[in-house]
Amino acid sequence: MSALLDQAKQVVALAKKKGAADARATAYSSREVELTWRDGKVEKVSEATTRGASVALYVEGRYSSVSTSDLRPEALEKFLEESISMAKTLAKDPYRTLPDPKMYEGRAQLDLALFDPKYETVTADLRRKVAKEIEDGARSVKGAESILSVEAGVSDTKSQSATATSNGFEGEREDTQFWLSGSVSCKDKDGRRPEEYDVMGGHFFSELGSASELGKRASERTIGTLGAAKLKSDVFPLVIENRAGGRMLRNLLGALTGRALQQKQSFLEGKVGKEIASKLLTLTDDPHLAKGLASRLYDTDGFATKKRVVIEKGVLKLFYIDDYYAKKMKVNPTTGMTTNLVLSGGKKNLTELMKDIKNGILVTGFLGGNSNSTTGAFSAGIQGYHIVNGTRAEPIAEMNISGNLSDFWKKLTAVGSDPWVYSSTRTPTLVFDGIQIAGL
C-alpha cells in the first residue's frame, strides 16, 4: 500500500513538473478471479490482474482525465507530456479545480473491516467445490425434475488503491470481496423458460452463508414462477421484496444528484426541507458501516465522509452535490456519491407484513422500464405473486406499474425489519397502498 501511495505522489510531482497547475493521481492494483460452473462442470475460469494509474490534470484552466497501465518512469514521462499537451487544446472550464483542502479534514480514524487477511486461502479447488455445492443444492429441491440448467458463479476480488493530490490530499484503500451466485432455468408447460437466481457476497469469505442453501433458494424461486400469468388490472396493496426494493429507491435518488439539480433535470428541485414521501421513510447514508459494501473514509473528491440523513420522516434533507457542481451552482458541496443506504426499519419481516393483506401483489423483481428524474414519471414490468388472505398464492408475470415517484413514495405504509444486506442499497421489505397495476 505504501508503494502505491509513493507511486501516486510521484505521478503528481511529475505532472506538475511537466506543466500541470494541479493534479490528482490514483495508483491502483487489483486481482479478480471468476469461475462459472454449469451443469456438472467448469464452464469458464478467468483471472485478471491489473495495475495502473489514473490522473486528473488541471492545465491552464482546462481539465483532462487520463489513465495508463505502463508505469515505467520513461513511459510515464512521455504519457504525461502528451496528456498535458492534449489538455491544452480543450475548452476552459473555470469550475474544474481541486477542492478546498479544508474538505479533506476530519477523516474518521476507523477500521471499516473491508479486507480479508485470509484472501489467499481461497484456492481454485475451493472455488470448484463451492460451485458444485451450489448446483447440488439447486437440484435437491422438490420439483427439480423441471430444471433445464443450473449455473453457479464464484468470484473474488482483491483491490488496493492510493490517491494523492498536489494540494495535500493522501488516502489509501484496501478491499476484498467474495460473491456466490446460482441461476436456475426451468421449462414451463407453455414452453417458456423462466429463470431466477440467488446471490450473496461480502468482504470475508468465511462469513458467506451456505452455498447449498443458496442453490436451493435459486431453484425454489425459479420453480415458484412456473405457471405465472396476468391478473386483471386493478388497484392493489403492493409489497416489494427486500432485494427488489433498491430499484425504486435508486429511481428516487436519480433526482438527488448535483448534476440533475444544476441542469434542471430534478423533479425534487427546491424540495429540501419539504415532505417528498411518507413519514415512514427515513433514509440514512452511512459510509462508516463496518463491512458495508460501500463503506469508505473519503469520497471521489477526497472529502472526509460522514453519516448523513438524506430523508427524515419523509422530509428531504440534502442533495448529493460534488465539488464541481457545487462551484457551478455557488453552493456548499455535500458529497458526490452514495455509500451504504440504510432505511430505518419496522418490526415485521416479509411474511409478517403479508399477513395483513387480503388481496395484493408481492413483487420479487422488476423487468425493464424507465424513470425520468426531470418529471418523476416511471414505469416498469413486475414479476412476483398474488397475495391472498395474507399468504403467497399464484405467480404473476407480464404486469406493469407506472406513475410518479412523488405520489408513489407518499403511499408507503410499512417498512420491514429485513434489510437486503448483499447490496449497498440495504432496502427492507416495503409496503405501498393503492398502487395501480396493469394486467389483463
Image (tube, grey):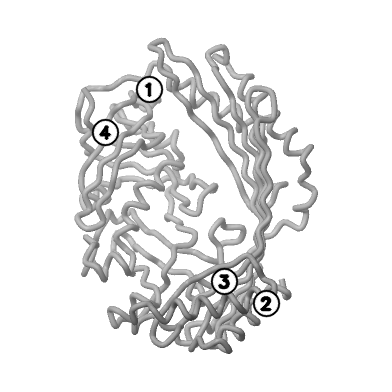
Identify the residue at image location x=49%, y=64%. Answer: 286
Disc 2 residue type? Glu
Q: Is residue 275 above or below residue 179?
A: below
Label 2 SS: helix
Callout 1: SS: strand
- Measuring from the top left, give residue 316's x and y in whole percent: 30, 65
Q: CA distance from mark 4 to mark 2?
A: 58 Å
Label drawn at residue 429: none
Question: Looking at the image, which residue is at 50% across and 54% down?
Answer: 424
> x and y percent of residue 300 in the render?
49, 71
Foreground tag (4 vs 2)? 2
Q: Quadrant of the N terminus?
A: bottom right
Earlier sequence position, callout 4 versus callout 3: 3
Return the mark for residue 297: 3
Between discs 1 and 3, the one toward the N terminus: 3
In the rendered image, which quarter is residue 337 located in? bottom left
Q: Which residue position holds label 4?
A: 400
According to the picture, the residue beneath numbered tag 2 turns out to be: 74
